[in-house]
Amino acid sequence: MNILYLCHRIPFPPDKGDKIRSFHQIRLLGSAHDVHVACLVDDPLDREHVASLRSYCRSVDAPYQSRAVGKVKALLALAGGTPLSVAAFDSPSLRRAIKERIRSGWPDAIIVFSSAMASYVPPDCTIPLLIDFVDADSDKWRLYAERSSVATRWIYRIEADRLGRFEREAAARADRSLFVSDKEAQLLGLTPGDGRTFVLTLGVDTDYFHPRNAAPAAAPRAVFVGMMDYYPNIDAVTWFAQEVHPLVRARVPDAAFDIVGRNPGPGVRALGDLPGVRVTGPVPDVRPYLGRGAVAVAPFRIARGIQSKVLEAMAMELPIVGTPNAFQGLHTTAADGIASIDSAAGLADELVALYGDAAERERRGRQARAYVQARHRWEAHDRELDSILAGMMGERAAASSTTAEPRS
């Protein structure tokens, strides 16, 4: 089968949440089908990865468009009715390439990764369409509005409304819609299990993220891993460093907090001036930092869907302490090595208790990895995606056969 796969950022290297999911899907599909990937490159350093991506698929269209250009397009869209997210990822070069692919009749199916890319599929396109929304992105903008300044709140509210309408319209066009959890689908008024809407959770490479790759924990150390130019991550580490970590250090004076991830801005870098806080910037491998931690923290006040960073830490046998937002979409309980607490004082109490109990940290770490192995292996994700795609194609084939039957 020939598959046209559209995604908003080049899915290589698979070093952040959206890239990890899209890359694994492309690798799976490319092992059995001819897959053509169409995506944007928005980081100059990612241009060198186009050749590597081609080894997993048939071909790649990946024009460059800087993030600065995307931001300008989003701002200009304010005056119209287009969602800012859709405008930001609009590229004439990519649109021409995709249009030519569709016009040629080459694809048997189109897979769209992230709702913003649905704009590249013409309204009159009759090719079977699967959209992996992952999360309800429109609700993320609503959450931004709740925690933003007056100056930006109105923009976020506009985007939440516009993108919400766009997502619902895209789902109505799609033969199949995928989400990481029931909640994400329900936010758009969709019902998982209705034959068109499916839950496809995140996977983790449990061989790569394995406790054998860990060094002895340098307790008492908390670690957070994530892209540090992403607002929910910035908000999480800032709140933790300023509100939670000082409460911990008041009782455990040598407690440390590592912020690990690329592109920390001035605000995040300034957190490194606080006692016991270290901001690493980009690192070649996050596993040594997870391995040296006693606890992984996920202090999210803004979050959507499932956090891959949480699952990866759990796979490394790290106990997780976080807010309820960190675990939405997961079927975790306290028996899975996690502690879900919605206050700075409560998080601090939990960390202090864990720092003083190595046996409890070890027990929870084993529970965490067992949860990931049972529920979040890529092999299960791959089987489910295969089944959903086969069901979509079978349904279309049956409909075409019925339409083609001569009338008596």
Image (cartoon, rainbow, N blue to C red):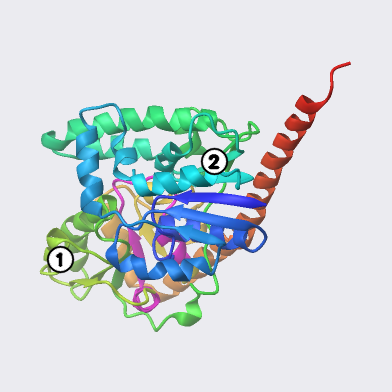
Examine the structure image and report whether residue 310 is included in the region drawn in magenta: yes
Which is more toward the observer, 355 or 7?
7
Asked if residue 375 shows in the view, the reply is no
Q: Measured from the top left, where is residue 163 in percent x and y?
A: 35, 33
* Residue picked out by circle 1: 269
Q: Is residue 268 above or below residue 137?
A: below
* Residue that protrudes farthest toward the bottom in the picture: 216
Q: Which numbered marker is on residue 172? A: none
Foreground residue among 313 and 189: 189
Name the residue carrying label 2.
103
Q: Dot 1: within a 10 Å radius of its alpha carbon, few (fewer than 14), some, or many (20 or more) residues?
A: some
- In screen coordinates, is 338 left or right of 348? right
**Residue 98 on image: x %, y %:** 47, 46
**Residue 35: image location, x then y, percent:** 58, 56
What residue range appears in magenta? 287-314
Looking at the picture, how far across and down is residue 407, in whole percent?
84, 17
Magenta stretch: includes residue 145: no
Vertical arrangement, residue 64 with respect to residue 399, above or below: below
Q: Residue at x 53, y 70 (%)?
A: 55
Q: Nearer the viewer, mark 1 or mark 2?
A: 2
Q: Secondary structure at mark 2?
A: helix
- Hey, what amino acid is under mark 2? Arg
Q: Residue at x 40, y 49 (%)?
A: 94
Q: CA distance from mark 1 to mark 2?
A: 48 Å
Res 32 seen here:
yes
Task: Say which element carries label 1.
Answer: helix
